[in-house]
Each structure stands twice: as C-alpha cells, then as structure tokens.
Image (tube, helix red, strand yellow):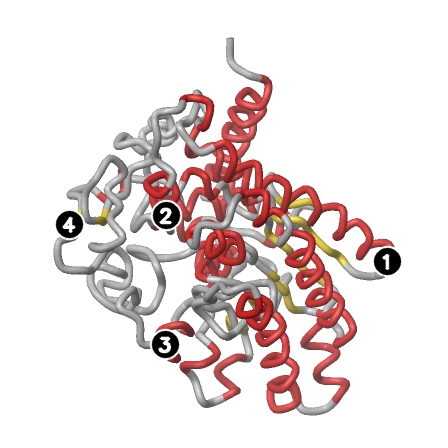
Amino acid sequence: MASSSALVLLKNASILITLSLFFLQVDGVLGCYTSIFSFGDSLVDTGNFNYTNESKHSCMKPPFGVTYFHRPTGRCSDGRMIIDFIAQGLGLPFLPAYLRHTNVQDFKQGVTFGEAGATGIDVPFFTSIGLKAYSNHSLSVQIGWFKDMLPALCGSPSNCRNMLRSALFIVGEIGGNDYGDGLRAGRSLKVVRTFVPKVIKSISSAIQALVNMGAVTVMAPGNMPMGCLPAFLTTFENNNPDDFDPSTGCLNGVNELCEYHNYLLQIELKKLREINPHTTIMYGDLYNAASELFHFPEKLGFKNGALRGCCGGGGRYNYNDSARCGDEGSTVCDDITSYVQWDGYHYTENAFKWVATGLLGPYSTPHINPSCVSLKSHSFDHPYF
C-alpha cells in the first residue's frame, strides 16, 4: 500500500504532466512580469561565486555547462538551473550575474544576486562559533547590493515604483549552506537545528526590506530535501536502516531538518502577508516538487535512479570530496538526462527542469497565474509523458 504522502506526490506529478502538455500549446506569455530579481545561493547563481572566489571546487570548469551552454558559465550543473527555467517560463531572458556585469542597464529585465555558498545568517555568526562560510555574501549583503543598484537602474522614484510593481522577486532558496556547513564540520543535527530560526528571521527581514523598497510580488522557495544529496549520503553513510527513508533511501534526520525550516518559513510568510496585505508573497515548495524525483525516478524518466551522481569520483553515491566533479579522478556518466543528481550537491538540468515546472505550477502558494507561464521552451521529452 502506497503511503498517503506518496499518493499526493503522484497526484501532483500527474498535474505537472498535464500542465506541461498544456503549456506546450502556449506560444508566449502575457508579460505579467517585466523582470526578475533573485537572491539566494547556488540554485540561483549564474556566475557570481566564480567572479569573486578562487576555489578548487569552482563550477567554472568542464564538465559544468556541457549540456546546454556547451561551456562552463558559473552555474553548478550540466546546464540550466531552476532560475533559468523560471525566467524562460515567464518569457524573460536568463538572468545575468550581478558581479560579472559593469553596466547596470544590463539588468533592466532582471539580475541574480545569488551566490553559491551564500548563507542566510550573516558570516560573523559562523566565525563566532568556529565555522567557515564559503561565501562572504550572505542574504543581507545581497539585499544591500540591490538597494545600492536601484537608483542607477530606474532613476526617478516614479520609474522605480513602476519597475518594482511589475517585477518578480525570488528570495531563496537560502539556508542550505547554513545547515550544510555546520553538518559537514561535525556539528550535530540538534545544534544545527538551532540555526533555523535565525535563517528564517534573515529571510523575513530580506522580504520586508524589498517590500519597503516597493516590491509587490515575492516568492520565497523553501529548502530542498538535502538528505537525498550524494554529498550528505556519503558523509553520513552507515548500515543503520533507521537513518534512511525506506521508500527513497534518503537521510531521515537531514530531511527532517529541511522540513523544519520549511515549516517555520511558511509560518513567517503568513505573518508577512498579514503585515503587507497589498503584496503577493508566495511560498515555493521546492521540497515536495523535488521529492517526486526520489519517489518515482524511473516513472519520470530518470532510469539511473535519484541518489547516485552523474559526475563524481566514485563510491556508492559517486561522490568523493577529494575528487569532485571536474577534478582529476572524477568521471562523467554517459547519459546525463537519465540522472537526477549531477555533482553531489546539485541536480542535473533535466531534474532542475522538473522542479522549476513544479514552482511554476502546483508547488507555489498562492500559484503563479497560469496565463503568465509558457513552458514551451523547456518541455519534457521523457517517454512517461
């Protein structure tokens, strides 16, 4: 007997398939949003991290970007990320990375301030407890960049007001690095759980700051199921069946941490809606949109399963911290489209496509108006459809 949660996911998967086929017949969008401004971590980073950091774990080297762009662009996948599919689905161009462009007029239709490794909590907090953050550009720093850029982008207050009213602001995903950095450094789940309210407070402050500047439509995506990532499955690999979800093979404790984050985030968004009744503040349910991939990978066309990375340095989950994707000693799978996981921390383009479709469909609350969305440019090719 399938669990009730699995049945709900299967029902929503069917809705996504229907939506995908419907959107195939839509030739364009109605211009509901004229721009997207995005903040967060690697899921929305199109090149910021690699502009300011010299890291051996850079996404700015082959085989990153091999599928769609045919070269590394700074995106931590084989191709497009969630933010790319959202932009395409709303009829907008790919978002440029803020730190890689000097002409502010390049941002008329949007820009991403998100950076791989970015945290929700400001970096001094991690320094104070002996942890290392891999980016200095936390969420509050990114909001500061936007505030500083705004006058040059739109000029007069009236022009800025009109631009902000027609823009979609995406705040997140954020928090995954706050928790992941702590777990990888050996902090217990109990300790890392205490970070969650601080992250939620940072997200709330960021959203309110944007609303105060004139934003009227904001989406705040939650955390994805980090307990399904090869990097964490490798770090916490053991033979205790109680640590793993029997239906997916994912880590229970890590996923419960993500669910706690999402629970508190939804409570906070409800408060923000009450404080700001003339704004639309959406919750993006990345967790359940992605969970479909782990419950039904084969049905969704991912014949090589959902837990083993396509690009990596070997091991049960094809993740090796000493030979990450792109490093000497790592290899790339033959059929990238049949894998959910790319490099141990990020999904393949094909999997990101599925998750993004969920955010543009049933997995945002309230939903984005379907008349604003066209998924023609990234339809699915799986036999399941």
Q: Is 332 rendered above or below residue 114?
A: above
**Residue 331, labelled with which disc?**
4
Q: Which residue is mark 2?
A: 347
Going by the numbered disc 2, the residue's amino acid type is: Tyr
Residue 89 seen anywhere in this rendered image of the structure: yes
First in sequence, mark 4 or 2: give its number.
4
Distance, label 3 to label 1, CA atoms, is: 40 Å
Q: Which residue is mark 1?
A: 277
First in sequence, mark 3 or 1: give its number.
3
First in sequence, mark 2 or 3: give its number.
3
Check disc 1: other Cα within 10 Å, few if <14, some if 14-19, many if 20+: few
Callouts 3 and 1 close, C-beta under 8 Å: no
Distance, label 4 to label 1, CA atoms, is: 51 Å
* Quarter of the view holding residue 145: bottom right
Which secondary structure lies at badge 2? Answer: loop
Residue occupying image coordinates x 69% and y 53% = 197
Distance, label 4 to label 2, CA atoms, is: 16 Å
Going by the numbered disc 1, the residue's amino acid type is: Pro
Which secondary structure lies at badge 1? Answer: loop
